[in-house]
């Protein structure tokens, strides 16, 4: 993911503070959402996880990517631990 990081940040990925990591992650998710919205695809936890794992422009998803998205969706559905 170094090329993705470089598109969204000028800070070295290895030494970036947590705030920069969160900022980049949010920008990547926003890009995934925008691409999926333009393509008329679902924008939910499962859809975002597909885009995160395979890339926003993927047209087909491997079984491994679909499995990843299912696991992310299951984790997101867990009750929040306080």
Image: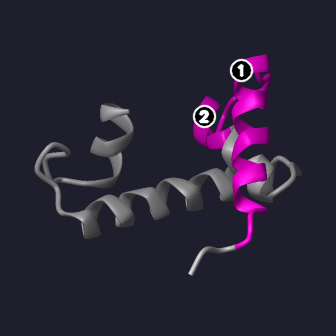
In this rendering, which labeled residue sits more in front, label 1 or label 2?
1
Task: Classify residue 44 by image quadrant.
Answer: bottom right
Q: Is-magenta flag for residue 68?
A: yes
Q: Position of residue 7 (x, y in %)?
A: 34, 46
Left or right: residue 63 versus residue 2 is right
Task: Classify residue 79 by image quadrant.
Answer: bottom right
The span shown in magenta is: 51-79
SS at mark 1? Answer: helix
Q: Is residue 80 above or below residue 4?
A: below
- At 48% from the left and 64% from the top, the residue drawn is 26
Quadrant showing the N terminus? top left
Q: Earlier in the sequence, mark 1 or mark 2?
A: 2
Give the numbered dot on residue 53.
Answer: 2
Residue located farthest toward the bottom when viewing the structure as drawn: 82
Give the numbered dot on residue 64.
Answer: 1
Q: Is-magenta flag for residue 41?
A: no
- At 88% from the left and 51% from the top, the residue drawn is 40
How far is mark 1 from mark 2, CA to CA? Answer: 9 Å
SS at mark 2? Answer: helix
């Amino acid at each position: 993911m170094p090329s993705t990081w470089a598109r969204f940040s000028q800070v070295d990925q290895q030494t970036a503070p947590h705030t920069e990591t969160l900022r980049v992650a949010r920008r990547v998710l926003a890009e995934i959402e925008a691409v999926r919205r333009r393509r008329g695809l679902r924008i939910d936890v499962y859809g975002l996880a597909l885009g995160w794992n395979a890339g926003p422009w993927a047209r087909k998803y491997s079984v491994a990517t679909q499995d990843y998205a299912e696991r992310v969706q299951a984790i997101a559905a867990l009750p929040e631990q306080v």
